[in-house]
Amino acid sequence: MVLSRLSFFLLSIFLLFVFYILAVPSPVLAKVIGECVNCHTMHNSQGGTPMPGVGNIPETGPFSALTRGTCVGCHSNTGSATIKTLGSSNIPVVFNTVPPATGTELAGGNFYWVVNSGESYGHNVLTIPGIVQDTKLSEAPGIPTQAQNGAPCDGCHSKIADCTSCHNPYHHGEDERPVVGVTQKGNAHKAVYYRYLANGSSHHSAGGVSGIEDSDWERTKSSSDHNEYKGGVLSTSGGHDADRSMSDYCGGCHQKFHDSSLVGTSSPWLRHPNNYALPAATNKEYRLYNTQDGTTIGPYSTEAPVARPVLSGYTGPSSTVTPGTDQVFCLSCHRPHGTPYKDILRWDYDGMIAGTTGTTARTGCFICHTSKDGV
Ligand code: HEC
Ligand code: HEC
Ligand code: HEC
Ligand code: HEC
Ligand code: HEC
Ligand code: HEC
Ligand code: HEC
């Protein structure tokens, strides 16, 4: 009797536990998980021979922070999968040596196209096998004047020496959810920002981007399943406004493309605006963003996304786009890593033909410029 009461008790605990596991969605983990050995080696030696790297691109250690690979090694794949698993850890892949499986490219794009299509299809990260310095670009177009001094600035501002030119990684950092990088967690130069986007240089202040991170890095994507990007202000201070926006971050290296003295402050513009709200005015085309029927506004598009000037209040991705508030920004048209299109665009610029009724109508630029195609 006592025993069966005990087993009943244990059974209910067990059932409650099962119910808990099924009912509570597993939290999106902010930091790396898994056994240390998945990613680290203490002496780079086992049985007298060097530990194999975890990247399937051959590399010879030891590597800094005792990892079993470099940034490129860990984050690349000789197969077409864009997320690979390492024990219980998932690694987002940014460089596939074969074409990434169609439609599964992660939000940043893929360096596959820089290696295989050419230098203008992405940022030329010099540590990726097969990539050399861009022959046409000896510095970031629109570079801030102060950064034109050669060393110690040139490894980030004139060329992309490594992934750390753009990322300041903190894989064990605990970030806030749902909006990452609102406050600076950690010291200025080791803090958790959206996708570790901040400069790792001791030569200037840390910057840092905030945003909402999609849990599979947009491997699957739809109008309700995506990252949320932080917008901000039209830059008035030489590209650096501490608004934690993506455009401010890109503008840190491409300053002249985001400085209102060189871009303008209203239509007619001198350069394409960024961190500028889609006009809601009825005499303009933007109020019908991503329209599917030509008369009503459509949902958020992962092909030509918008940024939100204020992310507080967002608990996750939203499919609603609000003209008058939501903004065009650098990643409305570009991806940062690599794409199948020149100038790292999100679509083929050659297909953007005013008045078209063909397959490119309602795509690319036409997602915002809804009256410039022919449909
Ligand atoms: C899934 C991969 C992964 C796993 C698992 C992992 N680490 Fe790391 N760890 C990294 C990477 C990548 C770096 C280097 C880049 C960085 O600092 O973000 C790192 C850096 C570190 C650092 C130096 C930077 C810091 O944040 O303090 C320490 C210490 C560390 N790991 C300890 C551990 C220990 C202990 C374990 C096991 C309990 C572990 N790691 C498990 C990937 C991993
Ligand atoms: C030992 C393998 C390993 C190495 C080496 C490594 N990473 Fe990672 N990295 C990971 C894993 C695993 C994740 C996924 C963590 C998670 O789930 O958020 C990750 C995530 C990231 C992310 C996305 C963060 C996010 O919020 O989703 C960036 C950016 C990144 N790594 C950059 C780097 C850079 C730059 C380096 C080199 C300094 C590097 N990594 C080295 C394993 C590695
Ligand atoms: C020019 C700056 C830049 C360079 C160089 C760069 N990244 Fe990124 N990376 C970004 C940005 C911006 C994002 C966020 C993309 C988004 O969310 O749309 C990102 C996102 C990521 C992610 C998350 C997955 C994704 O696609 O969103 C990983 C992992 C990552 N980067 C790793 C790397 C590694 C490894 C390298 C070097 C081989 C590298 N990055 C080089 C700017 C850069
Ligand atoms: C750390 C500085 C740095 C950051 C941050 C940076 N870039 Fe760049 N960018 C460069 C450099 C250097 C080049 C020229 C060399 C090359 O192509 O790699 C370049 C080239 C480019 C090109 C031209 C590519 C070509 O080959 O024609 C585009 C487009 C671009 N960047 C867009 C962006 C966008 C969008 C962002 C923000 C997500 C960004 N960049 C962030 C440094 C940077
Ligand atoms: C490790 C890479 C790295 C190095 C080295 C580096 N920078 Fe930067 N820099 C960045 C990145 C990334 C940004 C954009 C993101 C941000 O604003 O933090 C940036 C932004 C800037 C900006 C515009 C934003 C601001 O803070 O005003 C200036 C100016 C600048 N850098 C100057 C320099 C100078 C001068 C040097 C050399 C003494 C230098 N940088 C070295 C990566 C680097
Ligand atoms: C995410 C939305 C978005 C996308 C995508 C977009 N634009 Fe724009 N574009 C805007 C906004 C907003 C303005 C400013 C409108 C205003 O001030 O009335 C603008 C302004 C312009 C202007 C200047 C108009 C003026 O009034 O001075 C031109 C030209 C232009 N865009 C061309 C393009 C081209 C070409 C593409 C594709 C490569 C493109 N845009 C993609 C939102 C977008
Ligand atoms: C409306 C779409 C759109 C937006 C928004 C946009 N770009 Fe571009 N970008 C383009 C197109 C199209 C090109 C091709 C060259 C051209 O038409 O000027 C280009 C080219 C570039 C180049 C290469 C220039 C060269 O000399 O080869 C860089 C760098 C660049 N963009 C950076 C940025 C940055 C940084 C931002 C945000 C501050 C940004 N872009 C926002 C559409 C856009």
Image: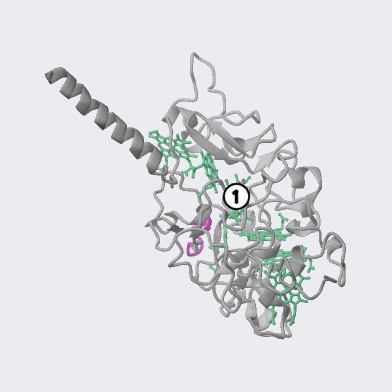
Above or below residue 261? Residue 316 is above
Q: Residue furthest left?
A: 2
Provide the major secondary structure of the magenta segment.
loop
Say which quarter of the image contains residue 250: bottom right
Above or below residue 339? Residue 355 is below
Task: Tell me residue 252's x, y (percent).
Answer: 59, 66
* Secondary structure at numbered mark 1: loop
Identity of the amino acid at label 1? Answer: Glu
Task: Tell me residue 182's x, y (percent).
Answer: 43, 63
- Residue depicted at 41% across the width and 52% down the height: 175
User: Would you say the beta carbon of the disc 1 residue lies within 8 angstroms of ligand 3?
Assistant: yes
**The N terminus sits in image quarter:** top left
Task: Tell me residue 14's x, y (percent).
Answer: 29, 29
- Residue depicted at 16% across the width and 23% down the height: 5
Task: Tell me residue 103's x, y (percent).
Answer: 70, 46
Q: Residue furthest front?
A: 1
- Along the horizontal axis of the image, is 310 left or right of 289? left
Say which quarter of the image contains residue 329: bottom right
Does the magenta portion include 135? Answer: no
Q: Nearer the viewer, residue 36 or 165?
A: 36
Say which quarter of the image contains residue 267: bottom right
- Along the horizontal axis of the image, is 50 left or right of 298? left
- Residue depicted at 63% across the width and 64% down the height: 299
> Which scheme is used to colour this image of the protein?
one colour
**The C terminus sits in image quarter:** bottom right
Above or below residue 305? Residue 278 is below
Q: Nearer the viewer, residue 293 or 97?
A: 293
Q: Nearer the viewer, residue 230 or 147?
A: 230
Which stretch did the figure color magenta? Answer: 197-206
Identify the residue under disc 1. Answer: 218
Q: Is residue 149 visible?
A: no
